[in-house]
Image (cartoon, helix red, strand yellow):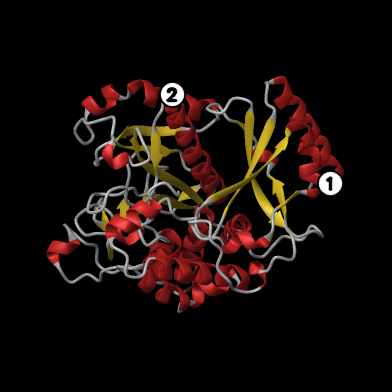
């Protein structure tokens, strides 16, 4: 472990490198409980001080709602106290679509340098370390979907009218998509796919898997890169769960694979579809906790406008091989590609704090391993049509009730973080009680 002096010296070297590249400032990000990316910035010359002492950001941000109002609940809601954002130099990245700026995700510590128990990024790291203590490593990656338009309501002014997944839509916005791709690649993001999606004006980008904290970092970087490129093209990007009431929404699906000693446990096992027993138990734990996990992975009232049957959103608590209607889709992969076997959680969206999402999924999966859990029979076909499958929560209030009863997630998150999630979700649910789908969409369309 490097000393404070060594870290400060490293930061000084990074500052010199950034200055030589024409970078003036560094954006430090954290994602709050409501899923909003909040920032502080420092000039490049102040980066060594930021690494040594952090940058002030009070704990009250844990109780911000998506509309910037603040709910009550515990000491984090008080005006007193302070925390320090400590940038992760390992993720320091010049921003290709925002010349003159660099980015780094930050961990939060108190003023004595002690890790803050309510820090969502540190929670993801704790769960990653908990898996590592068992000899397990997770590889994770998010798919990000968004809709672009030419004004504040993308549903009214979509610049690409071509068919779903169609070449025509790509041709209409090929310069824009090229710039998205170029910016991501320039930032070191390994893009796997970039293509039109189902809804009008909708696109998706998938990136290569990373460790869980790295995957969550990339989810932040990808979204803000797409947002910045969109702005430079005179477009507005919406990552909200739903952009138009009654229409197909935006997901942010989470892919994961489980590894041990360099072996992918999602394949070459004796179980169904090549799963090992450890892989099946992990996925069974996730499936069991999925109603509670939605309070983290689908945390907006708008999320439940998206989670409708027969829209590939994963509205039922079931799994299936290559089944895009199942909440957990298992992908066996190609026989000669051991890295390709994975599972996809389809119910999550970009209103989620990605650090909470990856950490909680690990916690649920490890609990499944502890219980030697097994998966129910897989679903073949659309669960809405074949029948007999339990719907996932249809409202934020329902998901929160499952979350509050989850001993697994309460223990993993710890009381400060668990309590902040409960307080914010209760306030968000109350905020939209009795609201129409149209008003929910209008209030959330450009918040995420």
Of residues 396 and 68, the one drawn nearer to the viewer in this rendering: 68
The residue to which callout 2 is attached is 179
Instruction: Give yes or no for contact between labels 1 and 2 (Cβ–Cβ under 8 Å).
Output: no
For label 1, the crowd category at 10 Å Cα-Cα, with few meaning under 14, some 14 to 19 and many 20 or more, is few
The quarter of the picture where residue 338 lies is top left
In the rendered image of this protein, does residue 18 appear above or below residue 55?
A: above
Of residues 49 and 328, the one drawn nearer to the viewer in this rendering: 49
In the rendered image of this protein, does residue 119 appear above or below residue 3?
A: below
Is residue 344 visible in the rendered structure shown here?
no
- Report helix, strand or loop for mark 2: helix
In the rendered image of this protein, does residue 314 appear above or below residue 75?
A: above
The quarter of the picture where residue 79 lies is bottom right
Whole-percent x and y of residue 69? Answer: 53, 61
**Residue 245 left/right relative to 419:** left
Whichever of callouts 1 and 2 sits on the residue coming sooner in the sequence is 1
Whole-percent x and y of residue 82? Answer: 74, 60
For label 2, the crowd category at 10 Å Cα-Cα, with few meaning under 14, some 14 to 19 and many 20 or more, is some
The residue to which callout 1 is attached is 4
Of residues 47 and 269, the one drawn nearer to the viewer in this rendering: 47
Of residues 94 and 365, the one drawn nearer to the viewer in this rendering: 94
**Residue 367 left/right relative to 435:** right
**Residue 224 left/right relative to 303:** right
- Report helix, strand or loop for mark 1: helix
- Identity of the residue drawn at 27% across and 23% down: 172
Identify the residue at the far left of this view: 385
- Identity of the residue drawn at 58% across and 71% down: 72
Determine the CA span between mark 1 and mark 2. 39 Å
Mark nearer the viewer, 1 or 2: 2
């Amino acid at each position: 472990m490097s000393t404070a002096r060594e870290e400060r010296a490293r930061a000084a070297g990074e500052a010199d490198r950034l200055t030589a590249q024409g970078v003036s400032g560094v954006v430090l990000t954290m994602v709050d409980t409501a899923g909003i990316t909040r920032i502080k910035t420092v000039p490049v010359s102040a980066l060594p001080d930021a690494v040594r002492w952090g940058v002030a950001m009070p704990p009250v941000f844990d109780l911000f709602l998506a509309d910037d109002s603040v709910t009550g609940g515990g000491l984090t809601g008080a005006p007193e106290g302070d925390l320090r954002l400590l940038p992760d130099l390992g993720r320091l990245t010049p921003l290709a679509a925002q010349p003159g700026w660099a980015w780094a995700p930050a961990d939060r510590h108190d003023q004595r340098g002690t890790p803050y128990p309510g820090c969502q990024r540190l929670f993801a790291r704790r769960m990653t370390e908990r898996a590592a203590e068992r000899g397990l490593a997770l590889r994770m990656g998010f798919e990000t979907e968004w809709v672009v338009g030419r004004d504040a309501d993308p549903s009214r002014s979509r610049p690409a009218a071509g068919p779903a997944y169609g070449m025509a839509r790509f041709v209409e916005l090929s310069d824009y998509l090229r710039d998205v791709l170029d910016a991501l690649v320039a930032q070191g993001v390994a893009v796997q796919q970039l293509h039109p999606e189902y809804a009008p004006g909708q696109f998706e980008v998938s990136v290569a898997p990373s460790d869980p904290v790295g995957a969550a970092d990339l989810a932040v970087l990808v979204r803000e890169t797409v947002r910045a490129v969109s702005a430079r093209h005179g477009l507005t990007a919406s990552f909200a769960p739903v952009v138009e009431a009654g229409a197909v929404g935006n997901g942010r699906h989470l892919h994961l694979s489980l590894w041990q000693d360099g072996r992918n446990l999602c394949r070459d096992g004796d179980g169904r579809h090549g799963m090992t027993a450890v892989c099946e138990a992990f996925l069974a734990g996730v499936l069991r906790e999925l109603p509670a996990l939605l309070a983290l992975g689908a945390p907006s009232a708008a999320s439940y406008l998206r989670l409708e049957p027969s829209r590939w959103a994963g509205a039922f608590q079931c799994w299936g091989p290559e089944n895009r209607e199942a909440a957990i889709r298992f992908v066996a992969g190609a026989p000669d590609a051991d890295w390709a076997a994975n599972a996809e959680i389809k119910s999550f969206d970009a209103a989620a704090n990605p650090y909470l999402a990856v950490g909680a999924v690990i916690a649920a999966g490890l609990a499944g391993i502890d219980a030697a859990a097994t998966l129910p029979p897989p679903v073949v076909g659309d669960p809405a049509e074949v029948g007999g499958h339990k719907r996932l929560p249809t409202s934020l209030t329902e998901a929160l009730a499952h979350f509050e009863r989850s001993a697994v997630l309460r223990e993993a998150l710890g009381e400060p973080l668990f309590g902040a999630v409960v307080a914010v979700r209760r306030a968000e649910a109350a905020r939209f009680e009795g609201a129409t789908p149209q008003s929910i969409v209008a209030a959330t369309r450009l918040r995420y």
